[in-house]
Amino acid sequence: MANERQFKLKSLLVGTRGVAEYRASIEKYVTSDDCILEIGCEWGTTSELIHKKCKNLMATDISLKCIERARIMRPKIQFEVLDVFDIRTALSFKMAFNKMYIDVSGLSGYRSLLDVIALTDMYASVFPMEAIIVKSGAVKNFAKRCIEWKGILN
């Protein structure tokens, strides 16, 4: 049974739909003091926008070919290969990430909603994440329909 001593995540989960919303969120959520882990950077187009506001960025993708191309196109940004489900490798970067951007196409649909929640909770329990921004219409739609119960027990 849950109680007040149970560990509770405090990370804000932001759902965006499409690339335009995902990139527009940078203006609101990224500051110069942030240490950001970006998952699914592909060739680094969004990475470049994040890097302009925050120099402490680790941009990652599962594809070595994408990372090699991103490194050539954007040599001032740090790019590494990372499978989002391999948190041990993320820990090996030895960075205290406080925000995370996730753009993984396989996590966009409703069937993967539980995977997104599990994934973001996993990262938020290991890193002190203030906010995790996910490009997922399913997450955004789910979040729109949720409210916190503030009944007599709260």
Image: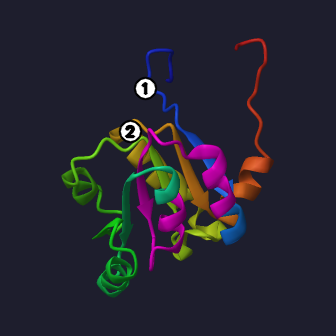
Picture quarter containing residue 148? top right
Q: How crowded is mark 1: few (under 14 residues within 10 Å), some or many (20 or more)?
A: few
Q: Name the residue under label 1.
A: 7
Nearer to us: label 1 or label 2? 2
31 inside magenta stretch:
yes
Q: Residues within 10 Å of mark 2 (few under 14, many from 20)?
A: some
Q: Dot 2 lies on which element? A: helix
Question: What distance separates the C-alpha of mark 1 from that of mark 2?
Answer: 9 Å
Q: Residue at x 54, y 63 (%)?
A: 49
Residue 46: image location, x then y, percent:
54, 68
Picture quarter containing residue 82? bottom left
User: Hey, what amino acid is under mark 1?
Assistant: Phe
- The span shown in magenta is 23-50
Q: Mark 2 points at which residue?
A: 125
Residue 118: image location, x then y, percent:
47, 52
Q: Is residue 54 above or below residue 17?
A: above
33 inside magenta stretch:
yes
Q: Which residue is drawn at 72% across and 56% down?
A: 140
* Closer to us: 114 or 21: 21
Q: Which residue is drawn at 33% across and 73% down?
A: 75
Residue 108 in the figure: left or right of residue 129:
right
Q: Residue at x 80, y 48 (%)?
A: 145
Whichever of callouts 1 and 2 sits on the residue coming sooner in the sequence is 1
Residue 80 in the figure: left or right of residue 143:
left
* Closer to us: 30 or 65: 30
Q: Dot 1 lies on which element? A: loop
